[in-house]
Amino acid sequence: MKTVINEIFTSIQGEGPVVGYRQLFIRFCNCNLNCAYCDTEFQSGQEFTPQELFDTIDFEYDLQNIHSISLTGGEPLLSAEFLREFLPKVKQKTKIYLETNATLAGQLSLIKENIDIISADIKLQSSSGIDTFKLHQRFFKECCGIETFAKIVFDENITDTEIQKCCNLGQENGIELILQPKMNGNKMSVSSDFCEKTLDKFLSNYKNVRLIPQVHKFLDVR
Ligand code: SF4
């Protein structure tokens, strides 16, 4: 079995509660969504078997001296069958951090025993242009027992109904919500004042919420 990997690189995690840690990023090709704000190149790459990918990263990187391997994309869960073979090999060396659009609950169930941390998006229709809320509801149930937080990219179009639905989802599943302002290049697309007001609206519904912008853009790293 093979999958296509777009790129492999080390950098500093710039999003969410593990911000600042050194990670090895493995970017998978393809995605099942088409978000309006997507700026990631993930269409082409090199084919690997699980053993070839393990041998490559084990030879080229010091896996014991990174915080974790970030599985990113595109959508890594589209390669769940591949990950089912790959993850047990690499799990002996470091932790596994999954970045996902949180819409593929069935695929998560195939590999969850080897995942340490899940960074799961809640897509807002007002900024992503797509309605995935029901898929998120199923996905977060499947995350039970794994350290999970939800990342919410927002812009000036966020609605009070969306805020309420996100807070309900956070509360029902006991997960932290990380608010991330949408970026235009290296600048936030909304004002600091709007960020603060949005955070306060969330906090009036649910206490386990933080605002963390994309720090790697300020650091000018990948
Ligand atoms: S889920 Fe992520 S990778 Fe897929 S289209 Fe949306 S922003 Fe891009």
Image (cartoon, helix red, strand yellow):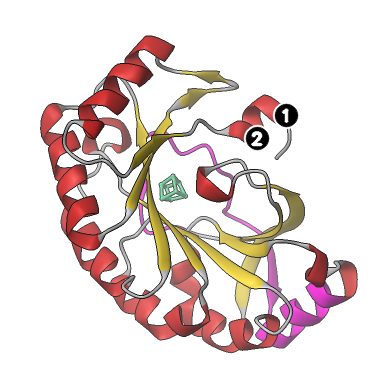
Does residue 49 appear in this view? no
Numbered circles on residues, count: 2
Amino acid at pointer 2 = His
Front one among 72 and 176 = 176
**Percent of width and height locating residue 110:** 40, 84
Q: Quadrant of residue 175?
A: bottom left
Quick check: 51 left or right of 30?
Answer: right
- The stretch in magenta equals 31-58
Q: Which mark is residue 220?
A: 1
In this view, 77 is above or below 19: below
Q: Residue furthest right?
A: 59
Q: Residue at x 28, y 66 (%)?
A: 139
x 76%, y 55%: residue: 9
Rendering coords of residue 52 (x, y %): 76, 82
- Contact between labelled residues 1 and 2, with CB atoms less than 8 Å apart: yes
Residue 160 found in image quarter:
top left
CB at disc 2 and ligand 1 closer than 8 Å: no
**Mark 2 residue element:** helix
Q: Is residue 81 above or below residue 79?
A: below
Vertically, is 55 above or below 11?
below
Q: Position of residue 10 (x, y in %)?
A: 77, 54
